[in-house]
Image (cartoon, rainbow, N blue to C red):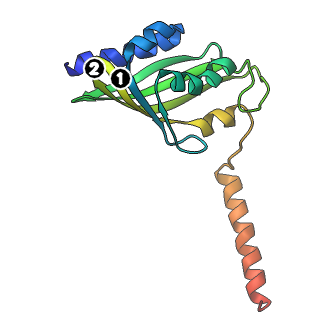
Amino acid sequence: MSKEDNKAVIRGWIEAFNERDLEAEADVLAPGFVAHVPDAPAPLDFEGLEAWRQFTAPFVEAFPDLRLTIQDIAAEGDTVAARVAFRGTHRGEFQGLPPTGKQVAFSSMEFNRVVDGKVEEHWVEINLLGLVQQLGVANIPGPRLLIRILVRQVEKLRSWLSTGR
């Protein structure tokens, strides 16, 4: 298959997901489909369509209007890379967090191996930190706060060193 054909397979998979068309999604994934999600709380590898659906189900349940948009796509040989944007509204429980009603936008980098018009392997890095920050679960100090924290720690260290401990 051509590079354009392989990119069309990935576009079709994204479209099937957005339409929640499980049959069309199954048609795009190879029988031995394997997904690699190294950026999950622990690295995960899934084999088969059903395992992939179990992974994606919490996202669909928590963000029922979740839509994916391909921002960039490129292909080389049987590999298709895509930068994907996610948008949705937090209307269901997500990782123990009750619905907030907040709209979220996060992204992923995805690499897919396409063979004979089917996705054989999928690697995805999802910006989960960006997602949970938008839900108010995680806060990362901004540059000003970070500098104050570092200065305070240096002052503590100097004080500790000056007492001869």
Inspect the image, locate mark 2, and give the three-letter code of the amino acid beneath it: Asn
Camera-nearest residue between 26 and 8:
26
Name the residue type under label 1. Val
Query: Mark 1, mark 2: which one is toward the viewer?
Result: 1
- Which disc is residue 57 wearing? none
1 or 2: tag closer to the N-terminus: 2
Left or right of 150 in this view: 106: left
Q: Looking at the picture, how far across and down is residue 111, in whole percent?
A: 37, 32
Tag of residue 6: 2
Q: How many labels does the image show?
A: 2
Q: How many residues crowd around disc 2 within 10 Å: few (fewer than 14), some, or many (20 or more)?
A: many
Left or right: residue 102 versus residue 2 is right
- For residue 145, side relative to residue 32 (left or right): right
User: Residue at image x 25%, y 28%?
Assistant: 78
Q: Position of residue 102 (x, y in %)?
A: 72, 22
Give left or right: position of 122 versus 46: left
Question: Which residue is labeled 1 in the image?
Answer: 119
Compared with residue 150, is residue 141 higher up or lower down, i.e. above or below? Answer: above
Q: In this view, does 108 lie above or below 60?
A: below
